[in-house]
Amino acid sequence: MATLARIRSAVPRRVSLQPFARTIQTAADTTQLHQDASHSEPFSVKLHEDSFRGYRTDTPSLDVEVTKENLLKWYRQMTVVRRMEQAADALYKQKLIRGFCHLAIGQEAISVGLDSATTFDDNIISSYRTHPFVILRGGTIKSLIGELLGRVCGVSKGKGGSMHVFTEAFQGGHGIVGAQVPLGAGLAFAEQYLGRKNATFAMYGDGASNQGQVFEAYNMAKLWNLPCVFVCENNKYGMGTSAERSSMNTEYYKRGDLIPGIQVNGMDIIAVHQATKWAKEWVTSDKGPLLVEFVTYRYGGHSMSDPGTTYRTREEIQKIRSTQDPIRGLQRYITDWGLAAEEDLKAIDKEAKAEVDAAVEEAKASPFPDEKELWTDIYSAGYEPPFMRGREREEGFRF
């Protein structure tokens, strides 16, 4: 280890060839009113000029039309998502959730913003930091918490756990790093083959960005002009390794070769919504695949077993939480634009906490699956083999 440390110290730190190049804006509250806010009609706002960066393409318009109804809806959804993840954190520490558990606290603008500009006919497939998509796309808080607890009320009947959650409108969390990306390309191929004008969003993190299968999926998608948006959630750290230590090119939106890409402020819900809307229009207009990089930040560790402070400082985390939090940014928009008072938002917070607390108790009251359920859902109904082997001869099961 000492030798390794000496080698690391001998390697010169990378110096940018363009030290004064403008970078992506990651503040959560830089959008400005373009006209007076309305309580009943859509109104225009203007995103910060550095909210987007483009590669081989123009970027989305900075002028966005929003409504009070949508802003309050997004605030409630983001608050519920965070409360739900905080509840999962507490349940894990109580040892009621076992195994793997990856939380997305700090990244709520991406899940809510992406959902806001898509329909349930569009495909979204991702890795294992995906709890928010369950409750945003057809599931319930009870079904998500129940799955984490391994109970029969779980969205995967208590047999999938944190990394394997699905709904009819969410094609899943997947545990194998990067493996969901070619699956996403396959979903996009199906949409093209069937002649449907739906978008597919294949999501992965910066930690999976160097997987060979990711680039293979890029290649096939570009060859076949698939309606696929490859979405990199760049939260700066792949497990405990910073992006700069793992990737020579950390501008992930530029890594598709001939595939155009955009980089987006992933901490501003309005920027995420606008970018998602633009990306969907791109791929459903027969322009081929697109790369989208959302620059974001996770507050916790990679998983619940990671304290998250051995490879970054507590000061860094606290600075992001205090200055770039996506929920607080949206809160400032709503109050500063006169759409609701702080007391109204506190009431939403209180309702979200009560809703999550009630769902947790209902999930805890649900039973564990029966042992015979270990042998179900392995194959589609009607396609089971006559016999399934277990770990030992005596554990075999006949369907």
Image: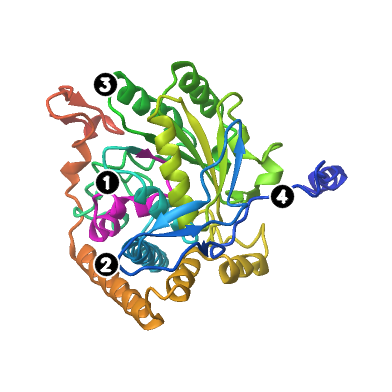
Instruction: Kindly identify the residue that appears in the image at 59 percent across and 37 percent down.
Output: 253
**Residue 133 part of the magenta-drawn span:** yes
Task: Assess whether mark 1 and mark 4 are in contact (beta carbons under 8 angstroms).
Answer: no
Residue under pointer 4:
22
Tag 1: amino acid: Lys
Q: Nearer the viewer, residue 217 or 59?
A: 59
Q: In this view, does 155 lie to the left or right of 34?
A: left
Tag 4: amino acid: Arg
* Disc nearer the start of the sequence (1/3): 1
Q: Is residue 204 left or right of residue 159?
A: right
Coordinates of residue 148 in the picture (x, y in percent): 32, 55
Residue under pointer 3:
194
Tag 3: amino acid: Leu
* Gap in angstroms between the C-alphas marked 2 and 4: 45 Å
Circle 4: element type = loop
Residue under pointer 1:
159
Q: Which residue lies furthest to the bottom in this view?
A: 343
Tag 2: amino acid: Val
Q: For the residue carrying disc 3, how many other residues have a C-alpha within 10 Å: few (<14), some (14-19), or many (20+)?
A: few
* Disc nearer the start of the sequence (2/1): 1
- What stretch of residues is rendered in magenta? 124-147
Q: Nearer the viewer, residue 197 or 135?
A: 197
